[in-house]
Image: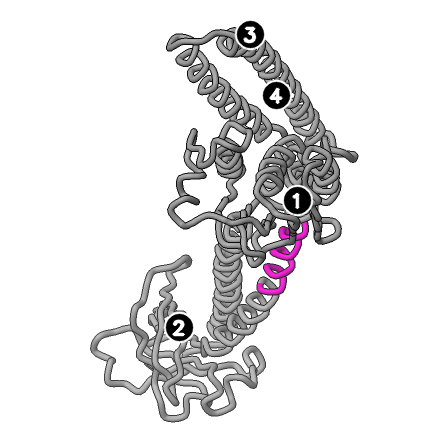
Amino acid sequence: MGAAIWSVLCLVAGGFVLSGIFRGAVQESMDDRLSFDLDGLVAAAEEDAPEHVTLNEGRFADPRFERVFSGWYWQIEPDRPQTRDIQPETSRSLWDQVLAPTELTPGANNSLWGYANGPDNQRLRVLVRRIALPRTAEGREDTETYRFTVAGDVTETEADVARFNRTLFWSFAAFSLGLIAAIAIQVRVGLMPLRRVSEALVRIREGRARRLEGQFPAEIAPLAGELNSLIAHSAEVVGRARAHVANLAHFLKTPLTVLANEAAGSSGPLAESVSRQVTSMRRQVDHYLARARAAGALDVLGSRTEVEPVLNDLARVLKRMHPDKELLIDIEVTPGLAFRGEREDLEEMSGNLVDNACKWARERITVKAGPLDRGRFYLRVEDDGHGLAPGERARAMERGERLDESVPGTGLGLAIVRDIAKLYGGDFALGESKLGGLEAKLILPRAA
C-alpha cells in the first residue's frame, strides 16, 4: 500500500511538472509567433503622412488579420502623448475596436509583453514594440516613433493545454492502475514463499507435519532452516524434560511404596499418621507430575492424536481391569476426529473419566466424541450409576476430595482431568447423564 501511494503521488507530481512544461512550451511558441508577426508588420510599415502609417501589402499579407474578430490583431499608433486622441491604424480583424494592453512587462529587443481584452471578451496575449520610422519633413530627414502592437487569442493555447492535460490524465491514470496492479502482483508473488512458510507452520501446529517441508528461495531458506532447528530443539528439550519427570516419578514412588508397606505392617498412632501422609504424598505426586507432563507437551509443535483408537484401546483395557462387572462400553466417535495434543494426555484424561465410570456404573457406559465449532471437539462419558448431586460434583472436582473411600483410587482423577484440559485451553464439566448416572464432558482443541 505504501509503494502504491508513493508511486501515485510521484505520478501526480510528474503530471503537474509535465503539464507546466507543455504550457510553457505552448506559451513560448505563441510568443515566437507574435514576434514573427511583429517583425513582418514592422518590415511592411511605411509612413506616408505625418503620424500615419501604411502597410506594403506585398510584404505583409496574412489572412488571420483580415477575418473580423479572428483572434489575431495588429495595431499601430504614434508614441507621443499629444497624439493619444488620434485613431490608431488597426487590422481589419479588429474592425472598429482598439487594443488597450495592460500588465505590460519588459522583454528583449525593447519589447513589452502583456495581456488585453479583445472583441467578444477574448483574452489576448500582446506584444508591443516602439519603432522609429524614417520620414522626410520640410526637406529634412527625421524619424517618428510608433507603437507596434500584435495580439493573439490565448484560447487556442489554452485549448491545446487542456487537450494535453486530458490526455496526460487518462494516460497517467491507466499507467497508475497498471503500476498498482504490477505492485500487487509483485507483492503477492514475492511473499508467496512466506505464505508457504506460514501454511507449513499451521500444518505443524495442527499435527499434520513435523517440520517445514519443500523448496524455498535463497532469501527464505535460512529462515526455514532455523525454524526446523528450533522445532527439533524444542522436541528434544521436551523429550528430556519428560524423561526427567518419569525418573522423578519412579524415584519418588519407590520410597513412598516402602513407607506405605512399613506403615501397613505396624500399628499405632505413628503408623496411621505415616500411612495418611504417604497416601496424601502419592496423590500430590500423581497430580503435579500429570500437570508437568501435560504442560511440557504443550510446547511440542506438531502434536496430533487420533481419538477413536485411544478410546477403543482404553475400553478394552478397562473392561479387563473390572472383571467383576459385566460392563457394556459403547464407543461412538466421528471418523477422522483428532486431538491437537499428545496421546499420553488424551489417554490420561479419557482414561480417568472412563475408569471412574467403570467404578460406579451398573452395566452400561457410553463414550461419544464429535467436532464443535472454532476448532474444538467434545468427549462425553456417561454411566448408569447412582450419579452425584450438584454439590457433590463440585467437591469431586476439587483436589484431594474423595467422596467414597470404599472404592480404590486417589480421588485426584477428575482434578487432573480438569487441570490438563485447562492447560490445553479446554473445559471440563460434570452433569446428569441420560442413563441415570454421571455425565463427564470434556471440550478440547481439535486438530485439522
Mark 4 or mark 2: name the one nearer the start of the chain: 2
Q: Amino acid at mark 4?
A: Val
Q: Is residue 244 above or below residue 18?
A: above
| Mark 4 touches mark 2? (CB < 8 Å) | no
As measured in the structure, the alpha-carbon distance from the residue carrying label 4 to the one carrying label 2 is 90 Å
Residue 407 at what x, y percent from top left? 54, 33
**Residue 179 included in the magenta stretch of the image:** yes
From the viewer's perspective, is the residue at label 4 or at label 3 nearer? Answer: 3
Magenta span: 173-185
Q: Amino acid at mark 2?
A: Val
Q: Amino acid at mark 1?
A: Ala
Q: Amino acid at mark 3?
A: Val
Q: Which residue is mark 1?
A: 447
Crowd class of label 4 (few under 14; some 14 to 19; many from 20; radius 10 Å): some
Residue closest to the eye, 389 or 68: 389
Q: Residue furthest right?
A: 215
Q: Which residue is mark 3?
A: 258
| Mark 3 touches mark 1? (CB < 8 Å) | no
